[in-house]
Image (tube, grey):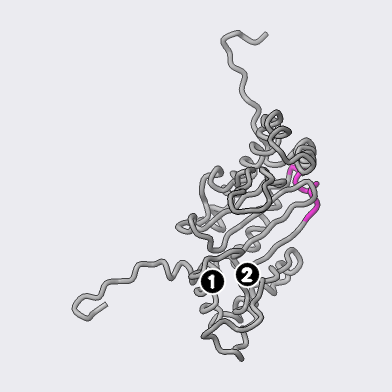
Amino acid sequence: MVSKNKVLAEPVAVPYFRPEALKFLRGLARNNDREWFQPRKAVFEAELKEPMLAIIRNVTDAMVDFAPSFVRPAEKCLFRIYRDTRFSNNKLPYKTHVAAWWSHSGLEKTSGAGFYFHVSAKEVVIAAGAYMPEKDQLAQIRHWMLDHHMEFRKLLQKAAIRKTFSEFEGNALTRPPKGFPCEHPGMDLIKCRQWGLAATLPAEEALKPGFAGLLIKDFKLAAPVVEALNTPIAAAQEPRRKVLFGLH
């Protein structure tokens, strides 16, 4: 018998999902309203939020070795399930997936390049790169590509990368950006508005005990691409040394 004074420990969330998680997301996709969600909020917490936090913590612990600048609390990486409908014609209140994003230290309030994954009832998406860089960051990456396009291509063309990922489509401009040489050999990269890698897997991958390990493996593989894209952004953020009596 359990003593009346003894508090039973809460079950520890595992770093993967149970089938109930995908069932919940399927139901949410069919019934995206508060009347359906609110009575089932406890299910969401137990079957989706807590496992997501466990997955994020596992991945973040591994990042200490290959991406230490991205180590941050799990709660800061997890996206809210609630949609921001203030400026959208789509007033559905909930996202139909759960997602996480690891941003570089110092870039938490902007964008930069980082690591991302989401799980929906239909698929798992794993991505790494600069998806929505701000205007200044966009310019910084483009100017960096002028001198580093060849080394960036080499990163993208590694056999393990090509086997695992597809490149972002790039959301490219139709013309070279103003001020850039039209005939530059890196113009296809310079015209892009996003750079990075993505992989789409069946949703059932998230149900496997090795799911966090899969994310770690893919993020570690993509880490050099993320580091390259953040190089010009980080350089631009470094405080300029003051000039004293005309000397640096």
Secondary structure type for disc 1: helix
Residue assigned mark 2: 195
Which span is picked out in magenta? 201-209
Residue located 79% across and 48% down the image: 203
Residue located 61% across and 72% down the image: 193
Q: Which residue reaches farthest bottom? A: 183
Question: Which amino acid lies under the numbered mark 2 shown in the image of this protein?
Answer: Trp
Spot occupied by residue 230 in the image (x, y as percentages of width and height): 52, 67
Which callout, 1 or 2, points at the residue further toward the start of the chain?
A: 1
Q: Is residue 237 left or right of residue 180?
A: left
Spot occupied by residue 14 in the image (x, y as percentages of width and height): 68, 37
Indicate whether residue 17 is drawn in magenta.
no
Quadrant in which the N terminus is drawn = top right
Q: Is residue 189 above or below residue 205?
A: below
16 or 217: nearer the eye?
A: 16
Q: Which residue reaches farthest front? A: 89
Spot occupied by residue 26 in the image (x, y as percentages of width and height): 79, 42
Residue located 62% across and 69% down the image: 194
Residue located 71% across and 30% down the image: 40
101 or 6: nearer the eye?
A: 101
The residues bearing labels 1 and 2 have C-alpha atoms spaced at a distance of 10 Å
Residue assigned mark 1: 138
